[in-house]
Amino acid sequence: LSDAGKPIWTSTDEDEGVLATLMGLVTAVSGFAQARKDKIKAVVAGSTRIVFVIRGALVLLAVTSLSDSPAFLSLLLESLHHQILFTLTSLVQKRLSTSSSYDLRGLLGGTDNVLAGLVHRGVADAGLFTGAVRSLAISPAIRDEAGRILLSAQSQLPDLLYGLVVAGDQVVTLIQPKQENLQFRASDLNLILNFLHTQPSLKGTESWTPLCLPRFNPTGYLHSYIGFVDDGSDLCVMFVSSNGTPETFHQFQQWKLAVGQALAREGALQTILDSSKRSVAARHESVFSDTRSPLLHFIYVFRPSGDRAQTGVLPQFISPQIQGPDFATAQSKAALWTQYHEVALRLRYGSAKPEVTLPDQEDAADAHALWGKPAAHTTTYQASDTCLCMGYASTEFELLAAFPPTVLPSQAHTICQALAHDVNKKSLWFFSHKALLF
């Protein structure tokens, strides 16, 4: 909502009258704190958590009766703020400052699915709370070939800023500038992946879409060409430029066709499509060699360190589908995700207690800086009646793993070490270790 109490978006379908009352109450509470030169961040009332993130004239609010910590919810709201900037840029603040009663819903028209998708992905996808992007598991030779084809296109496209090949919501490869301040951040790339995943109308057509990458420049638009390799395919080629002329669009259009033809000619296209389908349905047994292990599920984050961290290699993660009798209900899956949120924040931030909130980050360019720091702990766990969730970190990876509640933490730790060893042996298949820069 705006700081004047004007509704902008909600994840639930509420009556306009109910919303107006709620927005008025929220505005009064936040205004009460601001009048005393203070900020309200969170309210914990029994099992209910109410979290505020205030960004200029925008007030973002999350309310849950689950056990999610305010730290996680504030991270989710920060990402929701970024997704709004993705559509409107930070100049939305200027519009609201000149007219506090302005109704932003008209400018956000058609993006309900995008914002709802961001909330869903934030709660039930590892990208947000690990600060990483999902990578497609594929042969290193195929990944390198796709990257080589993109780089050959870049040499003929002087206005190109970024080039990506994406399969569903998984990154196959990307190219970007050598200048570090121009390179992708995982949070911006996750906004793009969410946009692509929540806009099925993009398939079967070609689009020339303005977008804002808050970590790159929150005040202005870039222009993106989005084209799928063939109708019905989840394989997308995306070019991003600062030049929005029709001539640039037609250049990108021709090169999308050339990239698709080159991938098909080299045999990479069908391999990527097959890998994407397998990856969606994959179970952890395809990764972990110990099939007798009580391991139920895991999330592995490859987090480049040292020289690799400075050359544009993004944090990436893999995670099999959550399935099996232990997670047969939506409630059991939600409980697992909540435990993952808590353990991930403990690993990285040191705590996820209800009274802990993340440091306030007013500047969108500095948001998610939390993930650039070393993990606070190397091992942590949380036990519940239904699951033992273990977190295990080193300088180059973080691992979150779920086990039956009967498994001892010491046993879970040993299994995590073995799983990390197995993933590391196949790391070149799971992750891109090389930054393709121009």
Image (spheres, helix red, strand yellow):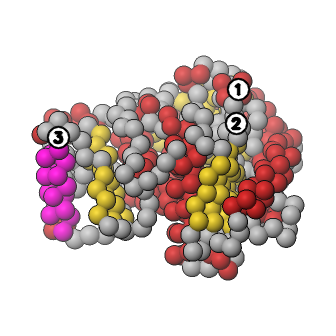
Q: Which residue is mark 2?
A: 395
Q: Which mark is residue 306?
A: 1
Question: CB atoms at circles 3 and 1 under 8 Å apart?
Answer: no
Can residue 192 be seen in this snapshot? Answer: no
Q: Residue at x 70, y 36 (%)?
A: 395
Q: Residue at x 53, y 56 (%)?
A: 341
Question: CB atoms at circles 1 and 2 under 8 Å apart?
Answer: yes
Q: Secondary structure at mark 2?
A: loop
For the magenta stretch, what is the residue range? Answer: 18-33
Question: Mark 1, residues whose alpha carbon is within 10 Å: few (<14), some, or many (≥20)?
Answer: few
Q: Nearer the viewer, mark 1 or mark 2?
A: 2
Q: Indicate whether residue 64 is drawn in magenta.
A: no
Q: Nearer the viewer, mark 2 or mark 3?
A: 2
Disc 3 from disc 1: Cα separation: 42 Å
Residue 189: x %, y % from top left: 56, 41
Q: Which mark is residue 34?
A: 3
Residue 32: x %, y % from top left: 13, 46
Disc 1 from disc 2: Cα separation: 9 Å
Quadrant of the frame with the C terminus: top right
Relative to residue 146, is residue 37 drawn left or right? left
Can residue 44 be seen in this snapshot? Answer: yes
Disc 2 from disc 3: Cα separation: 40 Å
Q: Nearer the viewer, residue 273 or 39?
A: 39
Lower sequence index among marks 2 and 3: 3
Lower sequence index among marks 1 and 2: 1
Residue 416 drawn above or below residue 46 = above
Give amino acid for label 1. Answer: Gly
